[in-house]
Amino acid sequence: MVAMLGRDPWADVPKLRQRRSAKAEKMDAAILTGLPALTSITWLQAQLWDNGVGARGGPRWNLKVKWTTIRPELIDRGRIASVRYAGLSTIDQWRDATKRRRNTKAWETAFCKHTVKVLREIDRARPAGSPEVRVGSISYRYSGHGTIVYPGQVAVLSWDHRDGEWLPCIGLYQAGDDGDGKWVSLGDGIDILLNSYREAEGRREGASDYVGLHYRDDYRALLIERREMAEAKAEKASK
């Protein structure tokens, strides 16, 4: 079961000092909650950038996720999507960065240990020739708050061999209840297979190297229904 972490983890996040409008305060609250329950996401797009082996000032792999939770029939990707980011580093680098973070709670440390254990098992089981597993915490750089790192929310980069090459697979996970009320295990997640976008026609400079989409079952069903209706209409018009 996917857990929502919207109560205790944000007690240490600094509040904005200046007076703000109700709309701005509502936006602040949305920023502080990180990813919603993954089962509530209707549509999600994952974009992955490869900064190169010699990248300086940050990790080689950077992830951007864009999503919406509104009803499928109301989706307008241009106006209602939320965005978060993750810098994906090695398992050891992510573990060390988590340990260095200030005001880390006991459950966050336990979650980190559990996640590292699971990811090491995945990394050891990867096929020969596959790039190593990477992981990063979901985060957002927000004016007035600095970079907010969301405890218990991680993105995992693994690899799948398709069409003669290794292509990335992104897993998004939240902390899950282990049954004793302790948020230390990895809950259910979303897995997204990404396709190469490097050679795409009309690709803009600075665009992501890989991109993938996730659809909730009810939205996927709606898309299929719309496609079938459009095909039937086109067939009828051609007669």
Image (cartoon, helix red, strand yellow):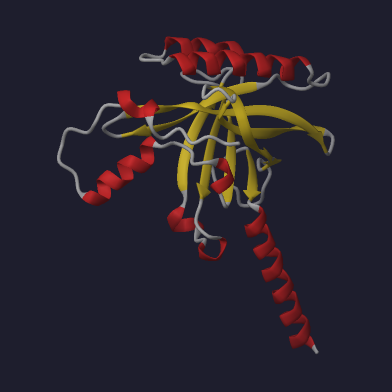
155 and 151: which is toward the camera? 151
Q: Quadrant of residue 164?
A: top right
3 displayed left or right of 193: left
Q: Quadrant of residue 130?
A: top right
Q: In the displayed image of the protein, which residue is found farthest to the front?
A: 180
Q: Quadrant of the C terminus?
A: bottom right
Q: Residue at x 73, y 20 (%)?
A: 122
Q: Residue at x 52, y 22 (%)?
A: 182
66 displayed left or right of 161: left
Q: Position of residue 68 (x, y in %)?
A: 50, 51
Q: Position of residue 144 (x, y in %)?
A: 26, 32
Q: Residue at x 41, y 37 (%)?
A: 33
54 and 132: which is toward the camera? 132
Q: Position of residue 184 (x, y in %)?
A: 55, 20
Q: Residue at x 44, y 36 (%)?
A: 34
Above/below status of 85 relative to 53: below
Instruction: Say if residue 207 shows up in the picture.
Output: no
Instruction: Say if residue 184 shows up in the picture.
Output: yes
Q: Position of residue 46 (x, y in %)?
A: 59, 41
Q: Quadrant of the N terminus?
A: top right
Q: How many marks?
A: 0
131 displayed left or right of 101: right
Q: In the displayed image of the protein, which residue is found farthest to the bottom?
A: 239
Q: In the displayed image of the protein, which residue is found farthest to the left?
A: 19
